[in-house]
């Protein structure tokens, strides 16, 4: 008889649906693999409340997911998505990025490189300090909402941009979401009789106020990089490989290794992903056996730098 053995989730929606509708299924489920920050937070909430019935693997905080999917991919897709939908010129535009996690970092770096004036809103002290050290002005959304040309949400939270913010935006302001689902922008508050919606092209709506002011809402508040852009296959392969290894680890783990809690993906698996996707044509260096022992690492190749070379020579491993 067919039965559910593992859950591969994004945002925690499937996990919560099964938990509410079919809780008995968790008796046979060997583990949950979650790839988004929102889903990870929900898993930690379940664990804290003592309601997490099976082990869960936090893929979102793995280095491969954080850097390649969240940072590098979003650094490219934010520009691609905005260009495809609005054909906006970035130079000189005042942009507010809500959230300075890995996604926010990627968006800020891309827009700064294109000549935009970038402001950051952030509630986490460490991320806020990082934004300052990277040269971005830390602000409250209320302080700059009237002058913003583009507002981008990257928090993984809900109602980051409220109806009050939307009412105070200037004419022509572009609003989009790079965070999670369609909850970061309070789009529901815009579906009222006094406001007019005008679809100008695919995934682009003008929301018009009675005084003639209009804002440009992209993808109805859904994820811009999934609705209006593309995700490189290189990044997809990294994320998919990371998830697959996490599922294999949970499935093959001997009983008792993982308890009913949330675990980070073991570092050695992240290294396996790197070695799988960054192969010939790149520069490598051996971590010699004596260095491996000193650092307590397994013996394998470490990628040194992503420089394409015509002739790949592996240096000697003698100490």
Image (cartoon, grey):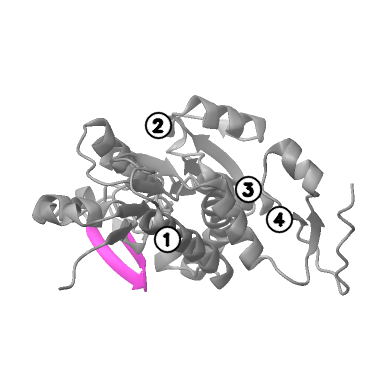
Residue situated in front as seen by the camera: 269 or 67: 269
Say which residue appears at 30% left-offset and 42% top-offset: 43
Tell me if label 3 and label 4 are in contact, CB under 8 Å: no
The 10 Å Cα crowd at callout 3, few under 14, some 14 to 19, many 20 or more, is some
Q: Is residue 213 left or right of residue 68?
A: left
| Cα–Cα gap, marks 3 and 2 | 23 Å
Residue situated in front as seen by the camera: 181 or 48: 48
| Cα–Cα gap, marks 3 and 4 | 33 Å
Of mark 1 and mark 3, the one earlier in the sequence is: 3
Magenta span main SS: strand
The relative height of residue 257 versus residue 64 in the rendered view (above or below) is above
Residue situated in front as seen by the camera: 209 or 107: 107
Residue 269 in picture, x, y percent from top left: 55, 54
| Cα–Cα gap, marks 1 and 2 | 46 Å
| Cα–Cα gap, marks 1 and 3 | 35 Å
Tell me if label 1 and label 2 are in contact, CB under 8 Å: no
Helix, strand or loop for disc 1? helix
Residue 167 in view of the camera: no
Please state, as top left, top right, bottom left or bottom right, where the N terminus lies in the image: bottom left
Disc 4 designates what residue? 300
Residue 295 in view of the camera: yes
The 10 Å Cα crowd at callout 2, few under 14, some 14 to 19, many 20 or more, is few
Disc 2 designates what residue? 142
Q: Nearer the viewer, mark 1 or mark 2?
A: 1
Q: Nearer the viewer, mark 3 or mark 4?
A: 4
Numbered range of the magenta stretch = 196-206
Badge number at residue 248: 1
Disc 3 designates what residue? 109
Q: Is residue 202 magenta?
A: yes
The relative height of residue 235 versus residue 176 in the rendered view (above or below) is below
């Amino acid at each position: 008889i067919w039965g559910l053995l593992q859950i591969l989730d994004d945002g925690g929606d499937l996990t919560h649906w099964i938990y509410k509708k079919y809780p008995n299924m968790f008796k046979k489920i060997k583990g949950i693999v979650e790839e988004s920050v929102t889903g990870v937070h929900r898993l930690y909430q379940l664990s804290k409340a003592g309601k997490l019935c099976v082990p869960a693997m936090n893929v979102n905080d793995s280095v491969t997911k954080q850097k390649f999917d969240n940072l590098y991919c979003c650094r490219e897709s934010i520009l691609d998505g905005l260009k495809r939908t609005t054909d906006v010129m970035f130079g000189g535009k005042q942009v507010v990025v809500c959230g300075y996690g890995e996604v926010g970092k990627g968006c800020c770096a891309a827009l700064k490189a294109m000549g935009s004036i970038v402001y950051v809103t952030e509630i986490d002290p460490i991320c806020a300090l990082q934004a300052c050290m990277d040269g971005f002005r830390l602000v409250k959304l209320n302080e700059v909402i009237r002058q913003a040309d583009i507002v981008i949400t990257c928090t993984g939270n809900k109602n980051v941009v409220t109806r009050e913010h939307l009412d105070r935006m200037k004419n022509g302001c572009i609003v989009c979401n790079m965070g999670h689902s369609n909850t970061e922008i309070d789009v529901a508050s815009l579906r009222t009789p006094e406001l007019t919606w005008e679809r100008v092209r695919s995934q682009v709506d003008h929301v018009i106020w009675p005084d003639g002011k209009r804002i440009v809402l992209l993808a109805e508040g859904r994820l811009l990089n999934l609705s209006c852009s593309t995700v490189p296959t290189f990044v997809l392969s990294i994320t998919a490989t990371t998830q697959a290894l996490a599922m294999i680890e949970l499935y093959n783990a001997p009983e008792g290794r993982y308890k009913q809690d949330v675990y980070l993906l073991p570092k050695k698996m992240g290294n396996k992903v790197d070695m799988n996707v960054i192969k010939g044509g790149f520069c490598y260096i051996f971590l010699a056996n004596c260095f491996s022992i000193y650092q307590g690492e397994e013996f394998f190749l470490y990628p040194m730098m992503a420089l394409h070379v015509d002739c790949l020579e592996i240096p000697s491993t003698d100490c």
